[in-house]
Image: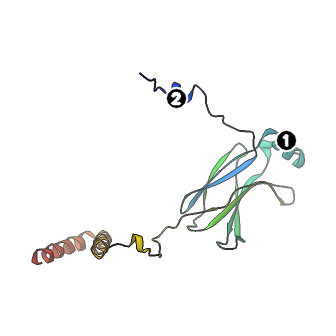
Amino acid sequence: MQDLSKESLDGNEALPQYYGKDRLVLLPKDPNWIFAYWELNPGTRRQIENRVQKPWNLLDLNLRVHRLQMLEEKEEDFFDIRIVPSADNWYINTNGPDRKYLVELGVFLEGGHFLSILQSNTVTTPRDDISDIIDENWKLTDWQMRRFYRRISLHSLSSPERLLKERKYQVETKIK
């Protein structure tokens, strides 16, 4: 019989916590949230500490979140989120469904200048509504459409209205 224990499946090896590469990765979570995670190797951290003349744990680290235009990828606006130097990931509330985002990890220097350390990939948050594109391959039949809209209309009614609507529907279906 084959051994299917956890130890035999992973070969008693664990994934490393860090890979020694400088990177910032951005992932869409849902229509209003994105997730960023990053890694800076010790050499890069030392370079930043030397440049700003402060130890890493005293740096004014920030995530600069850029909202981009959908077609041209030009910046519309941005906002900064101050983070703790020990962080290596962050959930970002964008309140922006169906938008493109790019994030930079950086530090503010004396005088307010933002020094970018890492730049992420670009992501698009998903829509938060029904698509207005009607595809013939996925079009609902008339009876499916009626059933779908009936379900939507029933669930948006208050309880007394819903009961009246259901009774009316039951009477109409018995007559037919």
- Above or below: residue 164 compared with residue 31: below
Q: Residue at x 85, y 44 (%)?
A: 49
Q: Amino acid at mark 2?
A: Leu
- Above or below: residue 43 compared with residue 160: above
The residue that disc 2 covers is 9
The answer to which of 176 and 129 lies nearer the viewer is 176
The answer to which of 128 and 73 lies nearer the viewer is 73
Question: In the shown orientation, is residue 152 left or right of residue 47?
Answer: left
Question: In the shown orientation, is residue 111 left or right of residue 15?
Answer: right
Residue 63 appears in which quarter of the rendering? bottom right
**Contact? badges 2 and 1 (CB < 8 Å):** no
**Image location of residue 51, percent across then percent down:** 89, 48
- Residue count near mark 2 (Cα–Cα under 10 Å), binned few <14, some 14–19, many ≥20: few
**Image location of residue 119, percent across then percent down:** 74, 56
> Label 2, label 1: how many angstroms apart (C-alpha)?
38 Å
Question: In the shown orientation, is residue 5 left or right of residue 20?
Answer: left
